[in-house]
Image (cartoon, rainbow, N blue to C red):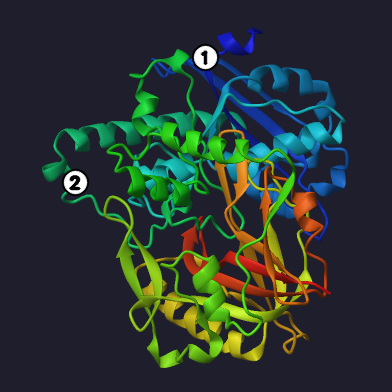
Amino acid sequence: MSRSGEDRFEIAFFDVETTVPTRPGQGFALLEFGSILVCPRKLIELESYSTLIRPADLNSINSLSVRCNGITRDAVIAAPGFDKIADRVFDILHGRIWAGHNILRFDCPRIREAFANIGRPAPEPKGTIDSLALLTQRFGRRAGNMKMASLATYFGLGQQTHRSLDDVRMNLEVLKYCATVLFLESSLPDILTENSWVCPNATTRSRSGGKLSPEGSGMNINISNQTGDNHPITSLRIETTQEVSNLLETVESSTNRSDPFDMGPLINEVKKELDQQDINVVVETPAQESPNSSLNASVTNNCNATMDFLQLDQVFIPYISASLVPLYRGSQRIKLLHKDVTLQLCCSHMKLRFGINTKFFDHAGRPRLNIVFDAPPKLCEVLDACDGLAQKLSLDSGSSSEWRPVVIRKEGFYNYPTLRLHIQTAVCGDIAIYATEIYQRDPCGTEQRLVFSKFDASELGALFTRGMFMDVFFSLDPYDYQQSAGIRLVAKKLIIHSN
């Protein structure tokens, strides 16, 4: 079934099974690939393909890998290497809508890595449907942790085998069941949704104010019009990404749109702003500020006036609290407060421990924009208090996720704690921009805002060198996603100190 990208209307559900890395620097190796092509109008299977894959290093198949998927060395010793099946995999995936459970965070990166390892370009999707993020948002955590095994048990579909072809077929059945339940609930919402319990900590990345997981991914669903507007999958369709939700809410508030999923105005806004810039980095010189201006005055002049950042000496730990606030369709998320106001912090003269590492990628294949700072004792005290409050509320609300401390402490290095700061991006189609404001301060105290016309992690990384100092303004965003929970520190503004 080889056709041009315009004709490829089928949805390619796929899944990979891999080895499990057990040491630093060891990557994943594909052990199995399975896929079904599905008609989006009738949700019937049109074609299937499955194969075991022999990894380059058979020793990478350890006991942990075998326990996860049951694939042994003997099972793959006669199987083809990935280079032998790459043509078939490319033909199945390229130019089609990709679908699967947790594919944005796991399966898609593994496919790209496999093609990169043999020196070939990877297939590109027409659109992507990640049922994990989609169902967490639309269906809620009625089935518990939203793993495929839990969803299958919830609907009585049997046990998950953790084999590629079986898993993608189960994935399709789960989507059918969820879509049916949501369709019935939408017909009689006051009656059928009354007893639809949703776990109160079902925080999703795509609607938590730009808080994408500690390491992860959001949602990018863009189904071609060729598939029709009335097929069953579109009842679960979302056209916003997690990173763009912040900009979407801003545009909504200024234009009073009735449809929150109408991306047209947002696309026009982003393109209009980028079209005004015809060079890679434009330096804007704001109004001259007095060198004696306080940090708070800097916030007032250069940041959104609605943002109130507290310096560490303004934080009184007994005034910090955590509460549950509404999120989506009955779900809730945790919010950290100080005197009943959203807690946001500013810290001056923070020392950078590690800049951006371009070896790690997000679900869309872009390098993760994280930077690591040394954490001063006072900041550690405040963040530890926030950790304790948020973790207790998470447990009290019924979460079983593993809590990850916000302050990173390694054994033997307790006196050198660090914290990870996430640089926000806003993504709309092929356009990616930085949502974090970045300034450069010269020795005289004058600040110049750096405006980037395109996403370029290497260019941004060149600005952040180890040992440099910055003033950082950040929010504290609790998350609970894919059995991991914690507080994510999101950079709102960075001021780079000149040498």
**Which of the labelled discs sits on residue 193, or is there none?**
2
**Residue 428 seen from this side:** no
Residue, x 78% and y 86% (percent of image)? Answer: 412
**Which of the labelled discs sits on residue 414, or is there none?**
none
Residue, x 48% and y 88% (percent of image)? Answer: 315
**Which of the labelled discs sits on residue 9, or is there none?**
1
Q: Vertical placement of 457 versus 96: above or below? A: below
SS category of the residue bearing label 1: loop
In the image shown, does 369 or 13 lie closer to the viewer?
369
Q: Position of residue 31 (x, y in %)?
A: 74, 37
Quadrant where the N terminus is found in the figure: top right
Tags 2 and 1 touching, CB below 8 Å:
no
Q: Please tell me whether mark 2 or mark 1 is closer to you in this view.
A: 1
The quarter of the picture where residue 443 lies is bottom right
Question: Which amino acid, mark 1?
Answer: Phe
Residue, x 56% and y 33% (percent of image)? Answer: 429
- What crowding class fits label 2: few (fewer than 14 Cα within 10 Å), some (14-19), or many (20 or more)? some
State how far apart marks 2 and 1 are (Cα): 34 Å
- In the displayed structure, does residue 274 sit left or right of residue 335? right
In the image shown, does 169 or 232 lie closer to the viewer?
232
Mark 2 and mark 1 lie on one chain; the one further toward the N terminus is 1
In the image shown, does 406 or 48 lie closer to the viewer?
406
Q: How many marks?
A: 2
**Residue 63 seen from this side:** yes
- What crowding class fits label 1: few (fewer than 14 Cα within 10 Å), some (14-19), or many (20 or more)? many
Question: Which amino acid, mark 2?
Answer: Thr
- In the displayed structure, does residue 257 sit left or right of residue 110? left
